[in-house]
Amino acid sequence: MKKRMKKPLKANQYLLLGFLAIILMGSLLLKLPIAHNEGIKISYWDSLFISTSAVCVTGLVTVDVALTFSLFGRTVIAILILLGGLGFASMVISFSLLLGMNIGLSQRSFIKEAYNLSSVQGTLMVVRTVALTALVVQGVGVFIEYFIFRSSYAPLDALGHALFNTISAFNNAGFDLMGKFQSLTLYRQSVAMNLTTAFLIIIGGTGFFVIADIVRNRAWKKLSMHSRIVVTMNSILIIVGFLFYLLVEHLEPLAAFFQSVTTRTAGFNTVDIAGLSQAGLLVTILLMFMGASPGSTGGGIKTSTTFTLFLSLGSLMFGRQTAAFKRKIGSESILKAFQVLLLSVLLVSGGSFLLLLIEGSKFTFLEVLFEIVSAFATVGLSMGITTEIATLSKLVLVVVMFAGRVGPITIATSFARKTSQLGYVEEQVFIG
Amino acid sequence: MKKRMKKPLKANQYLLLGFLAIILMGSLLLKLPIAHNEGIKISYWDSLFISTSAVCVTGLVTVDVALTFSLFGRTVIAILILLGGLGFASMVISFSLLLGMNIGLSQRSFIKEAYNLSSVQGTLMVVRTVALTALVVQGVGVFIEYFIFRSSYAPLDALGHALFNTISAFNNAGFDLMGKFQSLTLYRQSVAMNLTTAFLIIIGGTGFFVIADIVRNRAWKKLSMHSRIVVTMNSILIIVGFLFYLLVEHLEPLAAFFQSVTTRTAGFNTVDIAGLSQAGLLVTILLMFMGASPGSTGGGIKTSTTFTLFLSLGSLMFGRQTAAFKRKIGSESILKAFQVLLLSVLLVSGGSFLLLLIEGSKFTFLEVLFEIVSAFATVGLSMGITTEIATLSKLVLVVVMFAGRVGPITIATSFARKTSQLGYVEEQVFIG
Ligand SMILES: [K+]
Ligand SMILES: [K+]
């Protein structure tokens, strides 16, 4: 009799458990009195929420971070963001590398899952590029932001703010230490702050695999189809968002650009989100939903997914192949893209339904939907209800943030057994 | 030199043009003074709206039908509903049959498109079954409803109401002559009225192809996979909706059952829709979106599409084949199901966006989304904003109703050219 217990966990099951472990550890650390400013106490549920939000690089907060957390607490949050942003799996490998350990095939398959690579080969190179890029880009960020914050803070405080803000921006976390939930609204006019933060967000949200590809090949024609799709889609979405916020919401150019960049996953804001029109909020929801690129610090269904979906519609409408940049997109990728879409729609619908059940008519449907999509796409923008929801609702958001960060496909397939290929006869169904 | 003008229209282009022609003709007839009660005048846009709503069997109305329309007007509306419900194409054939004309292959391909059949063969049988079923079922409906209405109306009036109501129910149109936009709320307690109407709705919404299949084969095991899927999914959705309205919205059993049946496309109501909770409205939106079955008088993405989508997720999660009732669902059907989902989500998002742009903050997002989904799925339920929206918004709803009725796939593919199969190399993309 075979022992069923001995069956090894699959890579994505390790990934889920690893993320969970870090979140729980973080929630305990953030509950310690030493993590709080004097006279402040928070419930375990709030510390769980903040820990989840940090590890999932979401940025939704139920308490005022600046007011609540001590230097120790802020450091814990920053480390959680770093762990969550770079991904649990690549951290395991990075530490192993640092300690001179051997990298086995099973560990590489972590990376493969985490970065959604189609083969195990080349993962080591990706990890090295990830680490180096992360270090260099964030170094530049801290350097510039130090001088920006220096105008308002003492040297050490300015350095602290520069560090926290850079980590939060590069990892698309959207946490801030400005207090009163005002995010970067104070810096709405600051060209330096807006451009630096946008730069960090864009690099972090492009995905390390694409960055590794660009670093290695340095020519558009040599890039993989995936990299070209990501760069193209990213540019299109930034421009479309910019034009929308500029022309329809009548924001000034700098604010419109920043809002377009930050909406698709970073979650900082320089403008009052609740002050947008309902049409603007709907567009914001759609931008959040589409999100950043795979293998990046960002969330959402991802730019490559959105691109593939539209390509499939284009092929339906114009009878063309689903091809881009002279490569045909595999039918597996297309099916997966649609499955991601459906799972995401179900997750968002389910989350909204639960929140509406719990909260009744306390908030509008739009506020609830906005909050859930923001949690799912690990954006962190809010129309302002996060601090007012019930504990049960916070738990719903915790689950949605987690599912959104590890990805609905990862969760869904962690149940999968091997496909049984019984020889059923194929038959078409009438659709639509 | 070839004459490009001579290229024949495709079947679905005929279908689109046919629907359009009937709608425009209807809008002109409904604008005639003879169509209105004394002293009543309506704008062309309202008559266009009512005509579209009738032909698309939607049931959204910008004016009070009972108050506005004369016997002539009501007759025009009933005929538009009949034409729209049975489908333009099958009407052409039915008339041809009646007149003893020959049925050519090109006409049969109308039917094939209209009923989403995978082959041209057997279409004649389907048309005969359609006509006969429609006649018998509606005959029974009129007979029963006459006695229900007889308790409040004189014989001729009762007959008129029974006729109009039966046509409206069987064709899932949701139009009523009760006045004051009260639909069937007066009959909330009437077991006879609720059951008769529900019976008409369910038969009409099951799809003539399935009915033909059942009439012909009379045994579960002999039915096509499609028929079994439709019957199964219909039952599941009716039960789920019933339990939800009963347990969460606390409606009494009869009202909960009727609401569950009517939501997925008929659009009558015995309860106050705007009085449902926000969670209830979200579930109603989802039920409307899923809709009735293909080739029926109903709309939405269709039961078979929903079934296929969930089956695909099941296969992803549990590693099983996408098989049901011992038949594997073709990968073409699966791709088409996802494309229908995406097109429908885009249509609903786009429609909602336009309405929000036009109306600003006059209505809540939930009211607007509800209205658009109702129009898309040709349901006709409303939280009460149809009569208050701007003319431009009415035009948006007209387009959404039309696109929803003929189906997003039909519209999308009417642009299609032949697929060019250039031999691109296939490459996978990283998704989600
Ligand atoms: K974020
Ligand atoms: K209807």
Image (spheres, coloured by chain):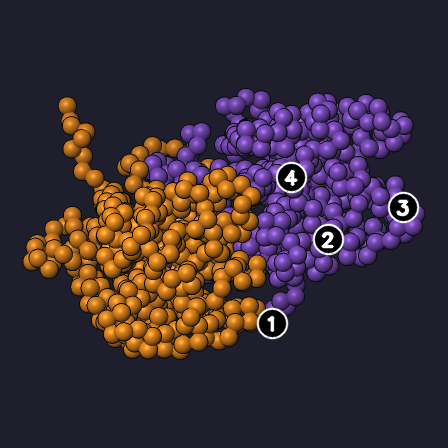
Chain colours: A purple, B orange
Q: Residue at 39% of width from left, 73% of height from top?
A: B194
What residue is shown with label 3? A37
The residue that disc 2 covers is: A388
Chain bearing mark 2 = A
Q: Of label 3 and label 1, which has the lower sequence position?
A: 1
**In this rendering, would B321 be left or right of A269?**
left
Q: Name the amino acid type tagged 4.
A: Gly
Residue at x 16%, y 55% (from the top left corner): B93
- Residues at marks 2 and 1, CA–CA distance in whole angstroms: 55 Å
Numbered label attached to residue A275: 4
* Discs 2, 1 touching: Cβ within 8 Å: no
Q: Nearer the viewer, residue B327 or A402?
A: A402
Residue designated by label 1? A1
| Circle 1 SS class | loop
Spatial CA span between label 2 and label 3: 22 Å
Q: Earlier in the sequence, mark 2 or mark 4?
A: 4
Q: Residues within 10 Å of mark 3 (few under 14, many from 20)?
A: some
Q: Decide: marks 2, 3 in contact (CB < 8 A)?
A: no
Q: Is residue B67 above or below residue A235?
A: below
Tell me if A27 is positioned left or right of A379 in this view.
Answer: right
To which chain does the residue with label 3 belong?
A
* Chain letter of the residue carrying label 1: A
Q: CA distance from mark 4 to mark 1?
A: 65 Å
Callout 3 amino acid: Asn
In the rendered image of this protein, does residue A118 appear above or below residue A258? Answer: below
Is any part of residue B68 visible from this angle? yes
The amino acid beneath tag 1 is Met
Look at the image and tell me in which quarter the N terminus of chain A lies: bottom right
Q: Earlier in the sequence, mark 2 or mark 3?
A: 3
> Which is more toward the observer, B262 or B187?
B187
Q: Residues within 10 Å of mark 4 (few under 14, many from 20)?
A: few
Residue B228, percent across and down?
Answer: 35, 67
